[in-house]
Structures are given as C-alpha cells and as structure tokens.
Image (cartoon, rainbow, N blue to C red):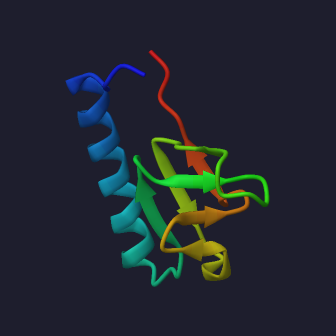
C-alpha cells in the first residue's frame, strides 16, 4: 500500500492525542495504539488489519504482536 499522506498523519496524531489525554485524565484503563499496530481477527497470526487508531480496554487481548480480537474502538480515516 502507498504510505499515508502528511495530512492523514497529522489528523491521526491530533485525534489520538485528544483521545489518549481523555483516557488518562479520567483514569481509564484503556490503551490507545496507532498504526502500524496489528489487530488479529482470526486465531492465526498471519491475517491482520491495521486501523489508524485502536483503543483496547481488555488488556488480555494485548500481546507483543498486537491485539487478538476486536478492539473496543477503532478509527480509520478514509479520504
């Protein structure tokens, strides 16, 4: 795939900062990750997606490779 545009990267950075600050300010336990971050939707570790922003609240889903199962919230920018 082609690399993201600078505008895409700026939007991702700004929105992820706002969301992450909100989580921290409110004492949330959710973790925010930005692409490249693998989300494995099947039981194998070969097929995955990389949403622009992923918020995972169930720490049991997290591994060093990414997230096993659907995150609680994903954001994908389309332009």
The residue at 54%/61% (across/down) is: 55
Q: On the rendered image, what quadrant is the C terminus found in?
A: top left
The residue at 38%/77% (across/down) is: 24
Q: Is residue 16 above or below residue 63?
A: above
Foreground residue among 59 and 48: 48
The residue at 74%/52% (across/down) is: 41
Q: Residue at the right extreme? A: 43
Q: How many marks?
A: 0
Foreground residue among 58 and 69: 69
Pinpoint residue 69: horizontal percent, then vertical percent. Answer: 73, 61
Residue 1 figure quarter: top left
Q: Is residue 58 above or below residue 77?
A: below
Residue 71 figure quarter: bottom right
Pinpoint residue 19: horizontal percent, then vertical percent. Answer: 41, 58
Horizontally, residue 20 falls left or right of residue 64, namely: left
Foreground residue among 24 and 51: 51
Q: Residue at the top extreme? A: 79
Horizontally, residue 21 falls left or right of residue 53, namely: left
Residue 11 figure quarter: top left
The residue at 47%/48% (across/down) is: 53
């Amino acid at each position: 795939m082609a690399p993201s545009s600078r505008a895409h990267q700026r939007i991702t950075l700004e929105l992820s900062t706002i969301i992450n600050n909100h989580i921290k300010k409110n004492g949330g336990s959710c973790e925010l990750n930005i692409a490249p971050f693998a989300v494995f939707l099947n039981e194998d570790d070969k097929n995955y997606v990389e949403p622009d922003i992923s918020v995972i609240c169930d720490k049991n889903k997290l591994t060093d490779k990414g997230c096993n199962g659907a995150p609680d919230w994903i954001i994908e920018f389309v332009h």
